[in-house]
Amino acid sequence: MKEFGSAVILAGGKSSRMKFDKQFLEIGKIRLIDNIINQLKWEFEEIIIVTNKPEYYLEFSQKVVSDEIKQKGPLSGIHIGLKESSSKYVYFVACDMPIININYVKYMKYKIKDKNVSACVTKSSDWVEPFNAFYSRDIINDVENHLLEGKRSVFSLLKKLNTFYIEERCARKFSPNWDMFFNLNTKEDLINYLKLIGNELNG
Ligand SMILES: Nc1nc2c(ncn2[C@@H]2O[C@H](COP(=O)(O)OP(=O)(O)OP(=O)(O)O)[C@@H](O)[C@H]2O)c(=O)[nH]1
Ligand SMILES: [Mg+2]
């Protein structure tokens, strides 16, 4: 099995805060998920979309799958994403994360290469970023058991495993304002993000 090569985009949530389905979000007439795919395809040979609405992806060339253990949140997507992937380590990102930092992806790969870790995630004081992270296919059973025990928390699962943590000060070198972990949860987040890219475009 190859060590790297697979990436998964999670698009199976309820978008209850945004109030419209985030997997269809368009920014500047470009679907955000298309934009994510276009950035990831240079680094990953296999991209998998985990969605609760596969019928909207008929024209996509990527592999499209749905949760096997349903209604359990992001960990359900991590579970099926790992099962459907073909490399040992799988990169995970959410469909509402507009900024992909390929240099950081490469850095994480470099840090865990030839090591046997369960996951590689970034820490910020007590918080752990569950996406823009790598998970190992070796933990499929752990994820499954966690879900079947009725637990949804990615953090409590990572605590039990051999997780490789990258410290905040190190990640900030790649993304000083933390934008590589930025996710659009609410309309306000979206407005702020549009302002940010508007500002960038206007210099
Ligand atoms: N496959 C799958 N993905 C999920 C599930 N729940 C959330 N996600 C994804 O996990 C990522 C982060 O989740 P949130 O930001 O909480 O998104 P959400 O759950 O749709 O939004 P809220 O309802 O506002 O919490 C997003 O990419 C979601 O699409 C799920 O049950 N299955
Ligand atoms: Mg949620």
Image (tube, rainbow, N blue to C red):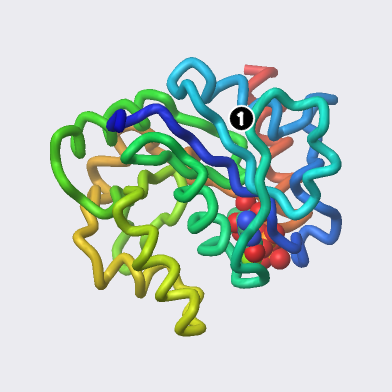
The CB of the residue at mark 1 lies under 8 Å from ligand 1? no
Q: Give the vertical position of 97 relative to 41 (above or below).
A: below
29 vs 70, left or right, is right
Residue 99 pos. (x, y %): 55, 33
Q: Where does label 1 land, which residue?
A: 36
Residue farthest toward the bottom in the current orientation of the protein: 149
Q: Give the vertical position of 16 relative to 191 (above or below).
A: below
Residue farthest toward the front in the current orientation of the protein: 1
Mark 1: which amino acid? Ile
The residue at 19%/33% (across/down) is 113
Residue 72 pos. (x, y %): 60, 72
Residue 86 pos. (x, y %): 42, 35
Residue farthest toward the left in the current orientation of the protein: 115
The residue at 75%/65% (across/down) is 17
| Res 73 quadrant in image | bottom right
| Res 111 quadrant in image | top left
Q: Quadrant of ligand 2?
A: bottom right
Q: Give the vertical position of 57 relative to 166 (above or below).
A: above
Q: Quadrant of the C terminus?
A: top right
Q: Quadrant of the N terminus?
A: top left
The residue at 60%/68% (across/down) is 69
Q: Is 94 in front, or is 18?
A: 94
Q: Which secondary structure lies at badge 1?
A: helix
| Res 80 quadrant in image | bottom right
Q: Is 137 in front, or is 121?
A: 137
27 vs 2, left or right, is right
85 vs 115, left or right, is right
195 vs 4, left or right, is right
Total marks shown come to 1
The residue at 78%/45% (across/down) is 54
* Other residues around mark 1 within 10 Å, as few (<14) / some (14–19) / many (≥20): some
Residue 197 pos. (x, y %): 66, 29
